[in-house]
Image (tube, rainbow, N blue to C red):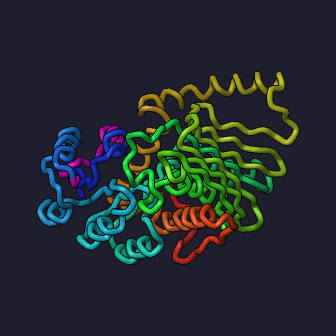
Amino acid sequence: MSDAIRLGVIGCGRVSWERHHPALRRTPGIRTDAVCDLVEERARRIGALFGARAVFTDYRRMLEECPLDAVAVLTDTAAHAETGVAALEAGKHLFLEKPVALTRDEALRLIKARGESGPVAQVCFNLRWHRLIRQARELLRQGIVGRVKAIHSVYTHDRTGETAPDWHRKLALGGGVLLNEGVHHYDLWRYLLDLPVNEVHVRSRPSAVYEDETGTISAELEGGVLATGVFSFLSGPNSEVEVFGDKGRLLISLYRFDGLQFYSWRTYPGATADRLKRGARALRLLPGLLSDARAGGGFQASFAGCWRGFIEAVRTGAPVGCTLEDGLAALEVALASTASARTGAAERVERGASGALGGHV
């Protein structure tokens, strides 16, 4: 494939123009030839933004009429399986937004459609390509915290939800903070530690807008490692993961350019020597800040990294950074979480065709 990869985009909602368009604009080797959305006016507007040559309101027509190499499915979660399976069965490489699907059976349909040697299929858990996550994963593999005892996540937003679509607000449509947002961090637990989640116990609270606005989770990973998380749509913007071991703790604060901090078991936060050392380290990290700034910030840069990984896999056959099986594993934790929120009891995580742990970046 010597020319640019010919891409069709299905779904022209907020994530398409806010996250994927800036990433694709900075990524060589791919061009958007067609877009599709059920709302024609929106499809035409986003098509013009992407510079697409064709605009559709029916993805089946797009797959039949456009000579595409790959398809990006950026729809609401309930449509992922139907559109993703259609793209794979049409022989198109698939770039799929998270969560992978609405149900476990739908995720398995996608895996079956891809087959053993079918088109490339990658799930957009973009945080796997975040600069700090990549660095943290390597440090953890080197044993920086020693024997891991626990992992803790915080993922909160400042969204009132007054203009949020139904699929973002209602549990049956794939909404709610535990599934739609928490799934990012369920994937990170597995990606950072190479450990699956066995059991979860969740508490959730609704609001006038969201059926699941704020939730907390307590979980147990393979090997007895404990996990906790706080997720909320309406608080303040934050995304952090902290890993605790017998040699210290590693804090990953994803909205800070200097957000990767290791505290040894001897170090008290705020100690003068430690603060001076961290100030000097922040100066050494300025090239990382400049790199992130050119890509629109560290979070936005992770989307560009995700697209670069997809392009490499399409062109060279390299392993994708997040497989459909990886997406299924995170979905299984999310489904157990929403079940626990309903019952108030601990729920075992159903695991099946989740494949090998981790992935390649």
Look at the picture and state if 280 lies above or below 102.
above
Residue 32 lies in the magenta stretch: yes
Q: Can residue 105 be seen in this view?
A: yes
Disc tally is 0
Q: Between residue 180 and residue 275, name the one nearer to us.
A: 180
- Residue 1: image quadrant is bottom left
Q: Between residue 78 and residue 67, name the one nearer to us.
A: 78
From the viewer's perspective, tell me whether residue 340 is left or right of residue 60.
right
Q: Between residue 75 and residue 251, name the one nearer to us.
A: 75
Q: What is the x, y in percent for residue 227?
A: 71, 56
Q: Farthest front residue?
A: 208
From the viewer's perspective, tell me whether residue 29 is left or right of residue 40.
right
| Residue at the (20%, 50%) spot, across then down | 39
Q: What is the x, y in percent for residue 86?
A: 27, 70
Q: Magenta part of the protein: which range?
A: 22-38
| Residue at the (42%, 51%) spot, across then down | 168
From the viewer's perspective, tell me whether residue 46 is left or right of residue 333.
left
From the viewer's perspective, tell me whether residue 198 is left or right of residue 63.
right
- Residue 191: image quadrant is bottom right
Q: What is the x, y in percent for residue 230?
A: 65, 47
| Residue at the (52%, 36%) spot, across then down | 158
Residue 278 lies in the magenta stretch: no
Look at the picture and state if 222 lies above or below 174.
below
Q: What is the x, y in percent for residue 266?
A: 88, 38
Q: Between residue 12 and residue 342, name the one nearer to us.
A: 342
